[in-house]
Amino acid sequence: MNISHTPEPNAQAPTAGDVLLLDSLIGVTIFDLNGLPQEYYGTVDGDDTRWIQIVFQAMGLQLLLGTAFQVSGFRHAIIHDASHPVAVFKLRTCCVAFLINPANFHDVTAWLVAQIDNVNLSDLLADQRFSVVVKS
């Protein structure tokens, strides 16, 4: 699956604060628009993949409720796991879930909500902190 979500035109380069916030990401999972996990990237601190199942179930529930109640417009959701919070975003070509260090959860989530359209996933996942854990 190609995850080349490119930033919107006129996107600004990340600031030092942006980089520090992104350093709080522990894991990233790419889902197709049907909610099926495609790729998982983890850091040394985030090699546990159990949280992906929780996101998968939540996305399935969202799809079911959206169909049953004809609700549309899902843009993002926050899942509070027992150990780490997860922020899930729907992009044009995929959905992406971020496993976040709980110490910086509020700042990172606020930044992602404001900047998700400017995040280049390919560049983020190319960072040396992330390694491929699962790729379908």
Image (tube, helix red, strand yellow):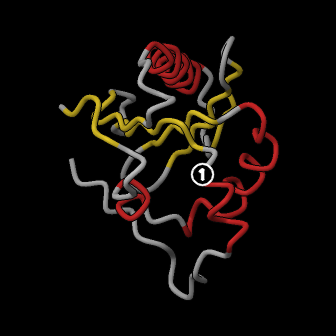
> Viewed as shown, does residue 8 lie left or right of 3?
right
Looking at this view, name the residue that lies furthest to the right. Answer: 106
- Between residue 105 and residue 110, name the one nearer to us: 105
> Viewed as shown, does residue 112 lie left or right of 7?
right
Q: Position of residue 108 (x, y in %)?
A: 72, 49
Quadrant location of the C terminus in the rendered image: top left
- Between residue 92 and residue 133, name the one nearer to us: 133
- Between residue 28 and residue 116, name the one nearer to us: 28
Q: Measuring 39% from the left and 46% from the top, which residue is drawn there?
A: 94
- As helix, strand or loop, the secondary structure at mark 1 comes to loop
Up the image or down, 69 lies above or below 97; here it is: above
Q: Measuring 44% from the left and 58% from the top, which residue is drawn there?
A: 124
Up the image or down, 81 lies above or below 30; here it is: above
Q: Measuring 45% from the left and 21% from the top, which residue is drawn there?
A: 52
Residue designated by label 1: 23
Classify residue 19 by image quadrant.
Answer: bottom right
Classify residue 121 by image quadrant.
Answer: bottom left
Q: Measuring 51% from the left and 76% from the top, which residue is drawn there?
A: 8
Q: Position of residue 49 (x, y in %)?
A: 41, 18
Q: Position of residue 72 (x, y in %)?
A: 60, 39
Residue density around tag 1, few if under 14, some if 14–19, many if 20 or more, within 10 Å? some
Up the image or down, 110 lies above or below 88; here it is: below
Classify residue 39 by image quadrant.
Answer: top left
The amino acid at mark 1 is Asp
Q: Position of residue 125 (x, y in %)?
A: 38, 53
Looking at this view, name the residue that lies furthest to the bottom. Answer: 10
